[in-house]
Structure formats: C-alpha cells, structure tokens
Image (cartoon, rainbow, N blue to C red):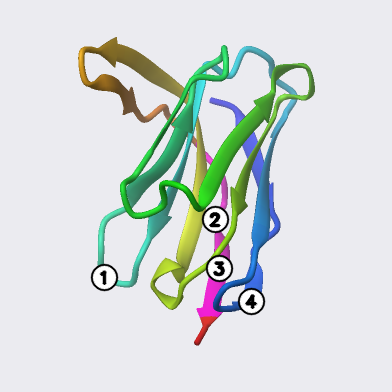
Amino acid sequence: QVQLVESGGGLVQAGGSLRLSCAAIGSYGLGAMGWYRQFPGKQRELVAAINSRGGSKYADSVKGRFTISRDNARSTAWLQMNSLKPEDTAVYYCNAGGIWEANAGGADYFEGSSWGQGTQVTVSS
C-alpha cells in the first residue's frame, strides 16, 4: 500500500471553488487513481478517476464542474471543484493503485487498496 496525504478541503459558499490535493509519500507508480466521496450514512461513491496517461472519467453529477488531474513525476493528483453545490458536501477520499479498464462505453475504475485520510468539503447555501 501507498501512504496518501490529502489536503484542500474546507468551507465554501455555493458557486465557489476548492482544489483537493493527494500526495503519495515514498512511492512511485501509483497506477490509476480516483477521488471518492462519502455522505453521512452512505457508502463511498466514485467522483472521478484518472489513468496513468491522463485519461479520465467522472460521475454524472460532477461532469463539467470537477476536473481530475495528476503529475506522475510528483506522485500527486488533484481534484479541482468549481460551481460547488450544497449537495457536494461530503468527506472526499483519494484512492490509488486502482485498475482502469477501457470499454465500449468509456472506462471503468476499480478501486485500489490505498486510501487517503479523507478531507471534509462543506458547501453552504
């Protein structure tokens, strides 16, 4: 497993932006990576994922508002979140070591075993 350190969460008004960072400590070759979020009492859901070549996918609820990116040399990934809504309020988690499978409909991301500690994002109305 890889140690992942997240940062960038916080409180923002609706319509605002936040940028989450996920840095891998002491490891290289992270494979595909993803950002998940978890609402109270719910299971984690995939928000966005990116493969090692920069190919990405997004949940329908965040398409056009969120952008996932990565820098392989720095072992870091980001989630830029724009036009935030109160319903985006959740704990966000970074995931690494996942599997990316291209298919006719685009791609599937299967979570890896490495998780960040989670960072709270709160969007006020």
Disc 3 from disc 2: Cα separation: 10 Å
Give the secondary structure at mark 2.
Answer: loop
Disc 2 from disc 4: Cα separation: 17 Å
Mark 3 or 4, closer to the camera = 4
Which residue is identified by label 4?
12
Category of crowding for the residue at label 2, using alpha-carbon neighbours closer than 10 angstroms: few (below 14), some (14–19), many (at least 20):
many
Residue drawn at (47%, 48%) of the image: 64
Q: Earlier in the sequence, mark 1 or mark 2?
A: 1
Direction right: furthest residue: 74
The reply to whether callout 3 and callout 4 are in contact (CB within 8 Å) is: yes
Residue span colored magenta: 115-123
Disc 4 from disc 1: Cα separation: 22 Å
Q: Quadrant of residue 67?
A: top right
- The type of residue carrying mark 1 is Gly
Q: Which mark is residue 118?
A: 2
Give the secondary structure at mark 4.
Answer: strand
Give the secondary structure at mark 3.
Answer: strand
Which residue is identified by label 3?
121
Place of residue 18 in the rendered image (x, y in percent of width and height, measured from the top left): 66, 61
